[in-house]
Image (cartoon, grey):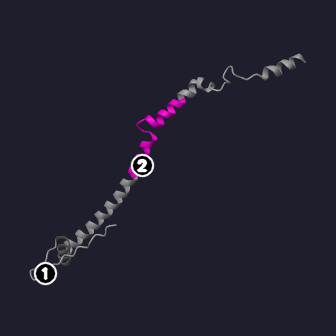
Amino acid sequence: MENNTENTTASSKPLTGRGFGRLAWLKNKYLIAGAFFLVWMLFFDPKDIGSAINRWRQYRELQASEQQLTKKIDDTKLELGQLKSNAQTIEKYAREKYLMKKDNEDLFIVNEAKKEK
């Protein structure tokens, strides 16, 4: 019965020795090294998360730009094919792009007023 009493008094003391304290995890060198490695890789490494997100965003913008430029190239190739094959298309192109006119014509240029908000 005496052993039972000693065990209860020993277990009622706070467990502060041998790794059971509040800041005992700070003594674990593996945990500290792992946390340091994690922080280093997330924030200070040249290939950190912020840089990866920025590169991904830039990649998406470049893909959209590539699609627009590809469409513009296709339209230009189609227009070039028409210019090489049709005289009326050449005349229309010269009138619209370079504001050319025939000798007996008058040319009126109308600029639309820009709406300011």
**Which quarter shows the N terminus?**
top right
Looking at the rendered structure, the kind of residue marked 2 is: Trp
Q: In this picture, which residue range is highlighted in magenta?
A: 34-59
**Image height check: is 34 above or below 117?**
above
Q: CA distance from mark 1 to mark 2?
A: 54 Å
Percent of width and height locating residue 23? 62, 26
Q: Is residue 69 left or right of residue 32?
A: left
Of marks 1 and 2, the one in the foreground: 1
Magenta stretch: helix, strand or loop mostly: helix
- Neighbour tally class for label 2: few under 14, some 14-19, many 20 plus, Cα within 10 Å: few
Closer-to-camera residue (95/3)? 3
Q: State the SS at label 2.
A: helix
Closer-to-camera residue (24/68)? 24
Looking at the rendered structure, the kind of residue marked 1 is: Asp
Quickly name the residue at label 1. 106
Percent of width and height locating residue 103? 9, 80
Residue 58 counted in the magenta span: yes
Find residue 47 and name its label: none
Percent of width and height locating residue 36? 51, 30
Residue positioned 37% across, 58% down in the render: 64
Quickly name the residue at label 2. 56
Closer-to-camera residue (106/88)? 106
Q: Quadrant of residue 27?
A: top right
**Which quarter shows the C terminus?**
bottom left
